[in-house]
Structure formats: structure tokens, C-alpha cells
């Protein structure tokens, strides 16, 4: 479970209303401006280019660093390469001493934050001024950046006015242009008075020894021009092979970072240029490895080296928008910050940060370098679990799902125990097992008769053309068995015989997302054994999380646990796995089933579950089925934003889950629709429970339930 | 292509002019000097980095008589006291409304960064489609400080409110000049 310290920080952040307000508004504005900036650009083609060039560079960091050193040295720079942040500090201390440097003006260099360089230099009696406005604000406030692109995004203008007033010793109003003017005046003196300028770099080109720096304020231009010594501290992951590689990076970075076509200033320096007085000056380039080459050798994490620090993953993250970067992040913020902290700080320091990821995948489609953050976070959890084991309570819960008979026995027992508490199929208080889950939403009552017992009573068509194995998953089986009945009905209508292998068990997703791969692997094996059947053409599930597990995760889990033979069997099964809506759409398109439009149906709004949308890419099929069945679709705002369920996440962090759910409920309310359609029983549990507790009359329905009585076997007549 | 350039540059708050030849471009520059009230007091001065576009047209003494406070000697002190800086750029990039130059000569950077108003001329004939085209053309080992400028200096670091002119110029006046000029 989360440490109490983390819980306290989470609660502080949540109580800070201005933070959530500012980040929430930002998130919405960002999505729109990013979309505008990418108009007319083939984002997927650009991603291909970036994955290619950054991937190649990450695989050859040492060679590229060497080549860069050679070229930059030829151009007159002094290059210092090191893996050890402490050596960077020593190098700079010596350089300052030898040159009588008393004052440094700095433009953004994230690598220097990994080693807390400013504090170190201050100890040496050197005055360091951050000159990026946001960085300066957080420096004066004694904080660290809460965002990779907008370091002071967590602060209000009133707070900034307070900080500036203290600095300049006059009372300043919270007027943004006036505050910016004060910063201009104050920092101008810092630029002009500095003996040394330190920048970072956004790209380092091996072929030419060039550093590329982008800013909007122009501070890097001044920092690299005015002081008599120029230093750049650069992480080796900024290296690329060719000068031409700068093009695609600068096409993506400003668009993804701030929705701009290009930043105001792009400076590319190759060796030192003459100083402001026209005299030759020194350029020192410090290339910092700091475990980046280790990372490059780790097949599961090497992808993180492709990161160009655009922060789009952070900007769309529902957890970041609630907590901000001081809680959800380290030196680098958000989910990617958790990953980088593992390498640049230590696996343990990232433990708290990574636990905050709800695994919604919202960050995946926006990343210009196609980094899969949630996947790396699961891998991190796996390693943490291996290293430290699971906390006791979690272990007990996991042991329960590990054995199907115990697990299902418990669920049956719970069905009886809940009786006195169940009302209208919803539970508002629970005696045990799920207690603690009901504060922000009601829970569905556990069914009297689970689907596995109901299935026996459903006669299957004789002589059907195809067979499909139905994988129910725990929620359909024990909480929403009616969905299972609808699924069977629809498939039967298409002339498909449905089987229900009784030995199926939990899909292992809860264990996997908690990092308990051993449990997830056991679940996977049990399910493969149950579902492997050469006569079965499809394995179908009405739960996207289960579908993703069966289709994409079994093999990966088994592989990671070293069961190559089982992984092969998982792969073989994976190709048969379908989510309900996609399969039904496929059958309808193949002319095996007709969805008949009924008249006068109610309006529905559709919620895209994270897994269905982003892992199975099934955005259209459910909408098409609903449309064909005659429902009027009223799209809600952000239909694909997470509902806050995230499996056991809502148990672990109910305080984060609740506001994410609240936002979803508000978007639903705004449509006026009384029916919220979805494909995921987990989302139904979360959203349905939230609606119930809020006293809303709107109800959640699975697409299978909504269309079950509107499907007919296709008539062969007409040839269609 | 020029209209794309103009639209993109204006979209990022640059003022864009096009002059049929150097003489008209010179008039435009002088109009800016007048408009900005250039005079001989700290903060009101101007620095001018001559280049191939206007170089031969400049009667420096006459100009300095007309605008006391104008200097063709660009030093960091002068630039820091100037309201207007005038430089010549080498390329325009249509797709983003960007101007680009080899700014290895530090005077170019001083004159374009320290004053509040930056007047930048570039030959229309060297308008390129985009940054990729520039990267193809430039050898960074020769152009050792390659500078691309897209609009004036800006920040959104306080409450994400866009504010123009934080460290660099608050105004960027771009004058595209038609005709052929020698290499910079
Ligand atoms: S998966 Fe969701 S919660 Fe996790 S980092 Fe990505 S956007 Fe944030
Ligand atoms: S992980 Fe991707 S989206 Fe996030 S900062 Fe890095 S490049 Fe940008």
C-alpha cells in the first residue's frame, strides 16, 4: 500500500483547489492547441521518423558521444564526458575557480537538476540565476519545477507577485504583464553581469558537434552570448546521428510541448562563437551519461531514451491534472518522470511516483516518440515486487485470485453475506471483502446466480457454423451475469455456438498491474488451458481489460516469467481473441447478423473505456452497433477520458479516483442522456456506482445488453 | 510562398513588410526609427548591423545626424541601451514564419536580442519552404551559431497567459526585400 507520506502529499495536492483548477483548464486548452498545431501533419509518419532516429541513437549512445566529442573538439569546444554527476560538479567548480567566476546565468538544463547543481554552486559561493521565467520563479520560491515545459504552472499570479515582491523589495500587484516586466528588468542585470552562462540542449548532433537549444523567451540566446564563458550540460540521450535529424525533432517538440509551430528561438551552436566583445571565448560541453547507457541496454526501458521532454504525456494525464508535478513526478514530471527517476535517482525513489499511475493509457497516443509509459510502469512494479515482495494485505488479496476455487468460493460467499445490504442491485455498504470501496460510489451486488451457473441453462444452436468460447471475466461472471446472457444471445443469432469453459478464471490483470507477475502468469496458464480449443474460432469477451489481457498480455507476462513454451501457446490463442463489439461488427459486416433499428429509442451517450479505445483501438464498432440499433448517440465531452476505476487503483487511491470519476459524471450529465453505454463492466461498476450515489437517474448499460433484442439472424435472401 | 510566410509570421505577432527594392526597405526602416522615437538617451538609442541588403545604400553620417543615438558600432553596452536593433537575416522559412541567419558574429545577436524592437531584413529570394530545407542548405561547421527567430520573445510561464517580450525584443518587424543581393 502507499506510504502515509505519499498519502499526505496526495491529500495536500487535492486540497489545493487552485492547483486542480489551473491544471484542469490547462489540460483542456492544451488538447485543442496541440490539435491545431498538428493540422496538416501526418503525425504517424512523423512518429515513425522519430522512433527511427531516436531509437538508432539510443542504441549507439557511446559511439555517438565519441563522435560528438571529436567533432565539437574540432570546432573548438572543450568536451567533458562523464557518467558521474559528482564529476560534473567538480568540473564546474574548478572551471569557476580558474576563471574567477562569481556569477552564473543559466537557461534551462534539466540534466543539471538531476545533480542539484544550483545548490552545490551556491555552496561554493557562486550566485546562480535561472533565467527561464518559470525556472526563476521556482528558484526564488525555493521549489522545484512542477512541469517539464512550464516549471511554475502550479503557481497563481498572486503567488508570483508575492515571490517577486520579496525579491525586489517593493509591493507588486498580481498583474501578469507587469510581473513579466519586472522579470525582464531584474534578469537583464543577471545576463549582463554573469561571468559564465550555462545552457542545456534539446538536441546534440554527433555528425557535426552541434548543440540545438530552443526557447521562447530568448534566454538561451543571451546566456550563450553575453557571459565570457559558455557551458552546456547535456544528457547523452539528446544525441542524434545527423544534422538532418534536427528537423523532425523540431517539427514535433514545439507542437507537442506548447502547440506552437516553432519556438520563438532556435539556436544551433557548433563550437564556440566569438564573445560579445568580439574576442574568442570558451565553450565547454559536458555530456552526462548518468546511467543512460545502462538504460539503453535494458530492453524494457530503452524506449524511454527516445523521450524529447515535450511533456504531452503529462499534459493529458488525469492523475497529473489532479496532483501536479510535485507529487506526481521527480526531477522529470509525470509518468515518464517516474521511469526516469528509477534510473537517474534509484528504483526506490520512483516507487511512490509510479504507484500513482492509473494505467489509463491516455499518454500513449500523444507521445511523439511512441513511448509506452504505462507498460514500463507495470514492468517497474514487477521488478519492485520481485525485489521487495508485496505488502501483506495486497499479498493476501492476490493469493485469493491465484486459486480459482478459493476465489470463486469467496465470491459466492460474498453474494450471500451482502444480502441485507443490497438494494436495487446496488450495495452502498459492504460487510467485508470490498469494504472501503463504497465511499465514492455504490457497488453492484454480487449476483445470486453467477453466469457460470446460468450458462448451463442456455441451449446452444445445433449444427452452428462456428464456435466461440466466451470468456466472462470476474465482473460479468459474478456481478453482471446478464451481460453474459446478452453476449450469448447475440452470437447465437449470428449462428455461432458459444461454449463456456468452466475452468476459466481471473484474467490476471489486477495482479499484473500490481506487478505480481507470478500470480498473473498462473492466471494466464489456467486460462490458456481452459480456453485452448482447436474447434473454437474466436475467444470473445465483453470486458476490454480481460480482452487486452488475453490478447496482448498473457504472452508478455509468461515471457517475462520465463515460460517461453507457455508464451507460445498464449500467442497462438491471442489471434482468436476478440472484444464483443468488434466481433459483432465483424459478423454483421460478413452478413451473418442484422442489427435492426428500433423506433423511438432513448438517446445514449457512449463512454470509451481506456483499454478498448487505446489498446484494442475499437472506437467505432460500438458506436456503429448502437447507431444500427436505432439509438441516438449524444457524444459527451472527452468520451475517452478515464473514469477513475483502474482496477484496484480505486481501492488504493480512492481520493484520486473520486475526482476523476466526478469529472466523467459531469460530462455525462451535460449530455442529458439517461443511458450511458459502454463496453466495460469495470467502467460500469465505477460510473454506475457514481451515478447511483449521486442520486442520478441515468443508468449504465453494456452495449451487449442494449443490442441483444435488436439482432436477427441475417436472411440469406437478397444475397447480402 | 510569401503569403504563407506573412500569415505565419503575423500569427506569432511579427509585423511583416515587403519592399520591392533596397531603397523602399530603407524607408521602412527609417519609418520604424522615427515611430519608435529613437534619440540620444539611454534606452532610446538604436544599433544597426549593416549587411549586403542595405549596406551600399546607407549614408551612415547622414543617418546619424538624423537620428542622434543611432550607431553602426554594435557593442554590448550600446545594444543594451538601445530601443531599436537592425540586422539583416539570410533566410525566411515560410511554413513557420521564421527568419534565420548565421549569427556567428556576436553583433548580430546583440542587436537582435537586447533592444526592445528588432527590425530584421531578409531577401525575399531566399525564402525557403521550411526548416528541413534550411538544414539541408546550411553547414553548421561554417555557420557556427545558426539562429532562427519566429516572432518576438514570449512567455506563458505565469498562469499560461501569453506575454510578449520577456528577455528579447517585444516587437519584431520583418522586412522582406525583393531583388538579388550578394551572399551575407
Ligand atoms: S497511463 Fe494514464 S495515469 Fe499513467 S502516466 Fe499515462 S496518462 Fe498518466
Ligand atoms: S514520454 Fe513522450 S510525450 Fe512524454 S515527454 Fe517524452 S516524448 Fe513527450
Image: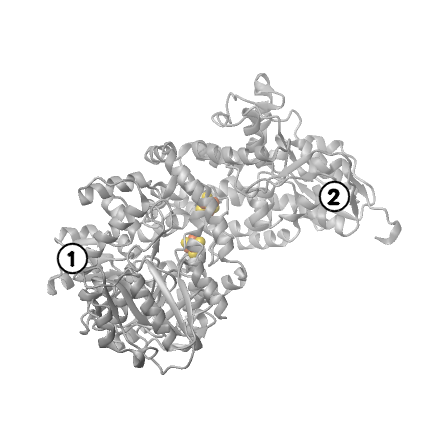
Residue B168 to residue B66: above or below: above
Host chain of mark 1: A
What residue does disc 2 label?
A: A628
Say whether mark 1 is within 8 Å of ligand 2: no
Q: Is residue A487 left or right of residue A615?
A: right
Both marks 1 and 2 on one chain: yes
Task: Give the x, y percent position of residue A673.
Answer: 63, 33
Task: Give the x, y percent position of residue A452.
Answer: 67, 33
Between the residue at mark 1 and the residue at mark 2, the CA separation in whole angstroms equals: 70 Å
Q: Nearer the viewer, mark 1 or mark 2?
A: 1
Identify the colour scheme used: one colour
Q: Quadrant of residue A527?
A: top right
Residue A407 to residue B143: above or below: above
| Residue B71 visible somewhere in the drawing | yes
Q: Nearer the viewer, residue A56 or A221?
A: A221
Q: Which residue ends up furthest to the top in the rendered image?
A: A420
Q: Nearer the viewer, residue A407 or A659?
A: A659
Task: Give the x, y percent position of residue A139.
Answer: 24, 47
Count of numbered labels shown in the rendering: 2
What residue does disc 1 label?
A: A103
Q: Quadrant of residue A25?
A: top left
Q: Is residue A603 left or right of residue A413?
A: right
Q: What's the mark number on residue A240?
A: none
Amino acid at each position: 500500500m502507499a506510504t502515509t507520506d505519499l498519502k499526505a502529499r496526495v491529500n495536500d495536492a487535492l486540497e489545493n483547489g487552485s492547483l486542480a483548477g489551473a491544471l484542469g483548464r490547462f489540460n483542456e486548452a492544451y488538447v485543442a492547441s496541440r490539435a491545431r498545431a498538428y493540422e496538416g501533419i501526418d503525425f504517424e509518419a512523423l512518429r515513425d521518423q522519430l522512433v527511427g532516429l531516436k531509437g538508432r541513437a539510443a542504441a549507439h549512445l557511446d559511439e555517438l558521444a565519441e563522435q560528438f566529442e571529436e567533432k565539437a573538439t574540432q570546432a573548438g569546444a572543450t568536451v567533458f564526458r562523464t557518467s558521474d554527476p559528482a564529476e560534473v560538479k567538480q568540473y564546474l567548480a574548478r572551471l569557476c575557480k580558474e576563471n574567477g567566476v562569481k556569477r552564473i546565468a543559466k537557461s534551462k538544463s534539466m540534466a543539471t537538476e538531476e545533480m542539484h547543481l544550483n545548490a552545490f554552486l551556491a555552496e561554493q559561493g557562486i550566485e546562480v540565476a535561472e533565467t527561464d521565467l518559470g525556472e526563476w520563479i521556482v528558484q526564488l520560491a525555493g521549489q522545484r519545477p512542477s512541469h517539464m515545459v512550464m516549471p511554475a504552472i502550479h503557481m497563481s499570479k498572486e503567488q508570483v507577485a508575492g515571490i517577486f515582491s520579496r525579491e525586489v523589495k517593493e509591493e507588486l500587484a498580481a498583474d501578469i504583464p507587469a510581473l513579466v516586466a519586472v522579470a525582464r528588468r531584474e534578469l537583464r542585470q543577471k545576463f549582463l553581469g554573469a561571468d559564465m552562462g550555462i545552457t542545456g540542449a534539446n538536441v546534440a548532433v554527433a555528425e557535426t558537434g552541434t548543440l540545438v537549444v530552443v526557447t521562447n523567451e530568448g534566454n538561451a540566446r543571451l546566456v550563450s552570448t553575453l557571459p565570457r564563458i559558455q557551458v552546456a550540460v547535456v544528457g547523452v540521450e539528446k544525441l542524434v546521428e545527423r544534422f538532418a535529424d534536427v528537423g523532425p525533432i523540431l517539427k514535433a517538440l514545439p507542437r507537442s510541448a506548447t502547440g506552437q509551430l516553432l519556438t520563438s528561438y532556435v539556436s544551433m551552436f557548433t563550437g564556440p562563437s566569438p564573445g560579445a566583445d568580439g574576442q574568442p571565448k570558451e565553450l565547454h560541453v559536458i555530456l552526462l551519461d548518468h546511467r543512460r547507457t545502462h538504460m539503453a541496454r535494458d530492453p524494457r526501458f530503452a524506449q524511454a531514451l527516445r523521450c524529447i521532454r515535450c511533456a504531452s504525456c503529462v499534459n493529458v494525464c488525469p492523475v497529473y491534472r489532479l496532483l501536479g508535478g510535485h507529487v506526481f513526478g521527480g526531477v522529470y514530471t509525470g509518468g515518464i518522470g517516474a521511469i526516469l527517476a528509477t534510473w537517474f535517482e534509484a528504483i526506490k525513489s520512483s516507487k511512490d511516483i509510479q504507484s500513482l499511475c492509473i494505467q489509463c493509457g491516455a499518454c500513449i497516443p500523444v507521445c511523439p516518440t511512441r513511448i509506452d509509459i504505462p507498460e514500463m510502469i507495470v514492468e517497474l512494479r514487477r521488478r519492485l515486487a520481485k525485489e521487495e515482495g508485496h505488502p501483506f494485505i495486497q499479498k493476501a488479496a492476490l493469493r485469493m485470485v491465484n486459486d480459482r476455487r478459493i476465489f470463486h468460493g469467496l465470491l459466492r460467499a460474498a453474494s450471500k453475506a451482502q444480502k441485507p445490504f443490497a438494494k436495487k442491485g446496488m450495495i452502498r455498504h459492504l460487510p467485508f471483502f470490498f469494504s472501503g470501496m463504497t465511499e465514492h460510489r455504490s457497488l453492484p451486488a454480487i449476483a445470486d446466480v453467477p453466469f457460470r451457473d446460468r450458462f448451463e441453462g442456455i441451449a446452444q444452436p445445433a449444427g452452428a457454423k462456428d464456435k466461440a468460447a466466451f470468456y466472462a471475466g470476474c465482473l460479468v461472471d459474478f456481478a453482471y451475469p446478464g451481460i453474459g446472457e446478452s453476449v450469448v444471445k447475440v452470437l447465437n443469432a449470428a449462428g455461432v455456438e458459444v461454449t463456456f469453459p468452466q475452468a476459466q478464471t481471473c484474467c490476471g490483470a489486477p495482479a499484473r498491474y500490481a506487478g505480481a507477475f507470478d500470480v498473473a502468469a498462473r492466471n494466464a496458464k489456467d486460462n490458456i488451458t481452459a480456453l485452448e480449443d482447436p474447434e473454437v474460432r474466436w475467444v470473445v469477451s465483453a470486458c476490454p481489460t480481460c480482452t487486452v489481457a488475453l490478447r496482448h498480455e498473457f504472452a508478455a507476462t509468461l515471457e517475462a516469467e520465463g515460460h517461453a513454451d507457455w508464451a507460445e501457446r498464449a500467442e497462438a490463442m491471442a489471434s482468436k481473441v476478440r472484444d464483443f463489439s468488434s466481433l459483432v461488427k465483424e459478423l454483421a459486416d460478413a452478413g451473418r447478423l442484422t442489427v435492426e433499428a428500433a423506433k423511438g429509442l432513448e438517446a445514449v451517450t457512449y463512454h470509451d473505456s481506456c483499454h478498448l479505445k487505446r489498446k484494442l483501438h475499437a472506437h467505432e464498432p460500438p458506436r456503429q452497433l448502437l447507431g444500427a440499433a436505432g439509438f441516438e448517440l449524444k457524444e459527451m465531452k472527452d468520451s475517452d477520458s478515464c473514469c477513475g476505476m483502474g482496477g484496484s487503483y480505486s481501492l488504493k487511491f480512492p481520493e484520486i479516483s473520486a475526482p476523476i470519476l466526478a469529472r466523467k459524471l459531469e460530462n455525462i450529465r451535460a449530455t442529458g442522456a439517461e443511458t450511458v453505454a459502454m463496453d466495460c463492466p469495470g467502467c460500469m461498476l465505477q460510473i454506475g456506482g457514481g451515478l447511483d450515489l449521486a442520486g442520478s437517474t441515468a443508468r449504465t448499460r453494456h452495449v451487449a445488453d442494449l443490442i441483444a433484442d435488436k439482432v436477427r439472424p441475417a436472411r440469406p435472401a437478397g444475397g447480402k | 510562398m510569401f503569403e504563407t510566410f506573412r500569415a505565419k509570421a503575423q500569427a506569432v505577432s511579427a509585423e511583416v513588410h515587403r519592399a520591392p527594392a533596397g531603397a523602399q526597405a530603407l524607408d521602412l526602416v527609417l519609418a520604424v526609427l522615427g515611430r519608435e522615437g529613437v534619440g540620444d538617451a539611454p534606452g532610446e538609442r538604436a544599433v544597426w548591423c549593416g549587411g549586403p541588403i542595405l549596406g551600399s545604400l546607407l549614408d551612415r553620417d547622414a543617418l546619424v545626424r538624423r537620428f542622434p543615438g543611432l550607431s553602426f558600432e554594435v557593442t554590448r553596452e550600446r545594444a543594451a541601451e538601445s530601443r531599436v536593433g537592425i540586422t539583416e537575416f539570410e533566410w525566411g522559412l515560410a511554413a513557420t514564419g521564421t527568419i534565420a541567419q548565421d549569427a556567428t558574429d556576436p553583433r548580430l545577436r546583440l542587436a537582435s536580442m537586447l533592444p526592445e524592437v528588432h527590425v530584421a531584413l531578409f531577401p525575399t529570394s531566399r525564402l525557403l519552404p521550411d526548416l528541413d530545407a534550411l538544414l539541408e542548405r546550411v553547414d553548421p561547421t561554417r555557420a557556427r551559431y545558426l539562429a532562427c527567430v519566429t516572432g518576438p520573445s514570449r512567455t506563458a510561464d505565469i498562469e499560461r497567459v501569453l506575454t510578449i517580450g520577456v528577455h528579447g525584443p517585444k516587437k519584431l518587424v520583418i522586412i522582406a526585400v525583393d531583388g538579388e543581393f550578394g551572399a551575407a
